[in-house]
Amino acid sequence: MAKGDRKRALRGRAGRMQGGRGSGRASAGQVRLWGRHAVEAALKNPDRSHRKLWATREGIDSLDGDLPPGFPVEYADVQDLARLVARDAPHQGLVLECAPLDDVHMEDVLTSEPTGPLVFLDQVTDPHNVGAVLRSAAAFDACAIVTQDRHAPPESGVVAKSASGALEIVPWVRVVNLARALESAAEAGYWRIGLAGEAEATLAEALPAGPVALVLGAEGEGMRQNIAAHCDALARLPIGERMESLNVSNAAAIALYAIAVR
């Protein structure tokens, strides 16, 4: 079937949407994603189970590749789609409801030969920041990000939109005890470097030749004392005195670049 014919065959019922909440919350057990990059990456991810796509015709046309025959699509206008997502969320004509990704376990990441860095986030709760860190992790070939299950945002449309497709690429490990996960990383051969503005050494001075586990704390509070104690070294980014600190996602991007080019 030709691309144009396939899209005509997928014509759904337009008008007022079913399931619209204006909160971005999906049906029970599902997650709702929006925006072209996030939706396109999820559609291409074979590990995703998709329930339904709401879209404008322009949104469908923006996707790279065709939807499978019979894929559940409901066409609607921009105003209708806005009812399905968080307030003022830039959905770009695409809203996808799908099953959350399967859990990724720490041992699954560590059993592979360590190559790219691991990124540990200590109580970083802003979904925009976590999504941006995922995006940088994908750009610089990090093998996973690791968060504490109770002090990190859930998988969501906000995380996915900020990650710009990286949510489908970078494994996200959720652990009960972040300190124990750092111990496991050390046993697997990772050198644990915590970013701290008060550290004497710069990141360039602290980087080893081997695999790195990069540890970042939340803005303001920074790393907890117990997490800092589980690092092999603390290091700072050499930023100017006029700025006290960087946003955690910006710091992650700079540090991952430094690791990539050492």
Image (cartoon, rainbow, N blue to C red):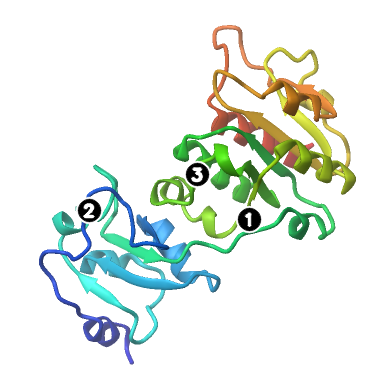
Which of discs 1 and 2 lies nearer the camera? The answer is: 2
Measured Cα–Cα span from mark 1 to mark 3:
12 Å
Q: Is residue 141 visible?
A: no
Q: Give, as a three-letter code, the residue at label 1.
A: Pro
* The disc label shown at residue 37, or none: none
Q: Dot 2: few (<14), some (14–19), or many (≥20) neighbours within 10 Å?
A: some
**Which residue position holds label 2?**
21
Q: Dot 1: few (<14), some (14–19), or many (≥20) neighbours within 10 Å?
A: many
Q: Give, as a three-letter code, the residue at label 2.
A: Arg
Query: Which quarter of the rendered picture does the N terminus lie within?
Result: bottom left
Q: Residue at x 70, y 52 (%)?
A: 143
Q: Is residue 63 visible?
A: yes
Mark 1 touching mark 2, by CB under 8 A?
Answer: no
Asked if 102 appears above or below 151 in the picture, the reply is: below
Measured Cα–Cα span from mark 1 to mark 2:
29 Å
Which of the two discs, 1 and 3, labels the residue nearer the N terminus?
A: 3
Which of the two discs, 1 and 2, labels the residue nearer the N terminus?
A: 2
Q: Give, as a three-letter code, the residue at label 3.
A: Gly
Q: Residue at x 77, y 20 (%)?
A: 202
Measured Cα–Cα span from mark 2 to mark 3:
23 Å
Asked if 182 appears above or below 198 in the picture, the reply is: below
